[in-house]
Amino acid sequence: MTSTRHPQPLSSSPSEVYVIPRQPHAVTSSQARILSPMIIIPGNSPITTTLTPSQLHELLPTLHIHIEPSLPGMALFPASSVSHPGLEQALRWREADNGSYTGIQANLIEIVQIYQALSFLGNRPTGQFLRPLERVIRGAFEKGFVLEECQALWDLRHLPFTEKWIDLMVRRLAANFETMVADGTSEFVFEGRLEADEVLRAQYAEYLSIFAWIDAEMELKLRWRCVQERMAKDAERARRITKMMKATRRRAVARLETVFE
């Protein structure tokens, strides 16, 4: 039977915008008068916030570790430890909850950076801040990728807490590659589908550009091969288990037939 599978659909654009919901929080006028520390990430402009210290502690539980004892009004981070745009947007997201606004608009890469910043600063994956972010990221990954998203996500690999998303991206792309190979085994029918379906044609063209980029990135190429080997082993293990189950069923049926003879 001819395969009718096709890769995950592409995002409509590399800057597709998602809304991250959050429960609104109230802020009192007395709280609003307390100043929060300025946040310094080397090589970037300082980040300030209108959040109170208590709100800041709720959003960034381990921020106090980075506050300079001699300068309590300043939190200093090591270089390459946290995404500057991610942390800044996380603060704006929380600030927006002080009013009637209950979400922030961001594209996939911005959301991953927000997730990284909040993870680095002590939030648990199951907590109130990371849970909605994870849902949005996984939903975006289900839609598929464009080259610009893959490149931008790969560029974040040196930051802590991005590995789970890099790994998931590579695994999904590897699965798509296997699907493309399976589709291509029936060349005549496959070419007919491509010729008739402009959207499918665009999807395959985009994925071919992604695979060409992977082939040119040595570190990524090695990871890609490891994932493919892992997938092949998993598939072989699944085949063996299926074969064993069928053999077990056949033996059970044979025994029953013997009993009732």
Image (cartoon, rainbow, N blue to C red):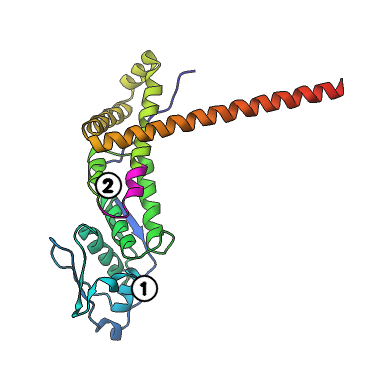
Kind of residue at disc 1: His
Residue shown at 36% from the left, 15% from the top: 187
- Please indicate, yes or no, whether residue 121 appears anywhere in the rendered image: yes
Residue shown at 44% from the left, 60% from the top: 126
- Residue 7 spot, x, y in % from top left: 37, 31
Look at the numbered disc 2 and give the secondary structure of its residue.
loop
Picture layout, residue 254 above or below residue 206 = above
What residue span does the magenta drawing correspond to? 159-168
From the viewer's side, name the closer residue of 241 and 9: 241
From the viewer's side, name the closer residue of 164 and 198: 164
Furthest-top residue in this view: 188
Kind of residue at disc 2: Glu
Residue shown at 46% from the left, 18% from the top: 2
Residue shown at 66% from the left, 24% from the top: 247
Residue at image mark 1: 25
From the viewer's side, name the closer residue of 4 and 118: 118
- Residue 170 spot, x, y in % from top left: 33, 39
Residue at image mark 2: 16
Taking the image as shown, residue 6 lies to the left or right of residue 210, namely right
Q: Quadrant of residue 250?
A: top right
